[in-house]
Image (tube, rainbow, N blue to C red):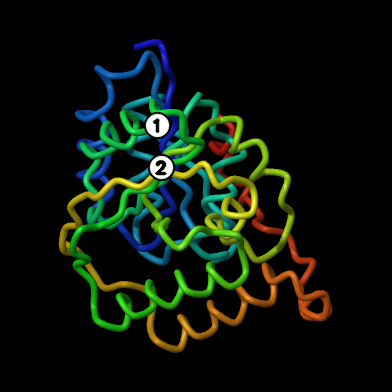
Amino acid sequence: MEDTISIVIPVFNSQNSIKELYNRLINSLENNFSSIELIFVDDNSSDNSFIKLKMLYKLDKRVKIIKLLHNFGQQNALMCGFHYAKGDYIVTIDDDLQHLPKDIMYLFKEMEKGYDIVYGIPTERQQRLYRRIGSYLTDKIFNLITDKSKDIKVSSFRILKRSLLKKVLNDKRSFVYISAIILNLTDNIGNIYIEHEERKHGDSNYNFKKLIKLFLKLYIYYSKNNWCKIFRSNKPQFIIDKKFGLNKE
């Protein structure tokens, strides 16, 4: 296959899952694309995640690692990784092994129907109740602040074309939410249903308080109401910790 693919993975305190995720990604992809790259963005983890990433980098030059100077959040870490992605297609996948790397090929096959982006939607979410409620409410907010069709669902597991990625990179809002940006750029969106595994290591970083804060920020930064602009920050989307020197390999 002549297509090239970039996988962007935001990492936060995932020292126990990084190596297994890497192995699964390589096993699923290396015989299916002419070139692959794995871009891990460490969102200033407090555990040994970055040490694990450096070990992978030394073993495999298809691995790119970036360390952020502060904790900017998953979405901002993704935006950072997007700036370094070179593939014809770009995939985003979580670091917790709940998404199955083998399903990337199903996303890609669906893309061949002509979509700009395809989301993998879990058939049964292996999440706590408040996270499932949060996903439901996030979908409702997107219906309110974007032109999203009610039939379209979104998730953090997706594949998009490079042409769409270039448009996403033009968005300079300090509070990043990738799907909110995309939903205002295209309605050529596909969905497929996939398995969703239980989290193997650690706990989610989200809680009910953080979800409420997320909903408020989504409305402030992505609503079309002009009065919201006075509450928006002009802080940078991310700052890379330059001292590690591997971010541009």
**Residue 78: where, in percent of width, then height?**
52, 51
Q: Residue at x 50, y 26 (%)?
A: 87
Name the element at disc 2. strand
Q: Which mark is residue 111?
A: 1
Write down the quadrant of residue 71 in the picture: bottom right
Q: Nearer the viewer, residue 122 or 201?
A: 122
Q: Residue at x 66, y 55 (%)?
A: 239
* 43 left or right, relative to 245: left
**Residue 69: where, in percent of width, then height?**
60, 58
- The residue labelled by disc 2 is 118
Q: Which mark is residue 124?
A: none
Q: Amino acid at mark 2?
A: Val
Q: Quadrant of the C terminus?
A: top right
- Please tell me whether residue 197 is drawn above or below residue 34 in the rendered image: below
Q: Amino acid at mark 1?
A: Met
Q: Nearer the viewer, residue 15 or 143?
A: 143
- Please tell me whether residue 42 is drawn above or below residue 111 in the rendered image: below
**Cα gap from disc 1 to disc 2, whole angstroms:** 6 Å
**Residue 209: where, in percent of width, then height?**
45, 88
Q: Residue at x 52, y 32 (%)?
A: 161
Q: Crowding near pointer 2: few (<14 within 10 Å), some, many (20+)?
A: many
* 165 left or right, relative to 15: right
Q: Are marks 1 and 2 in contact (CB under 8 Å)?
A: yes
Q: Quadrant of the N terminus?
A: top left
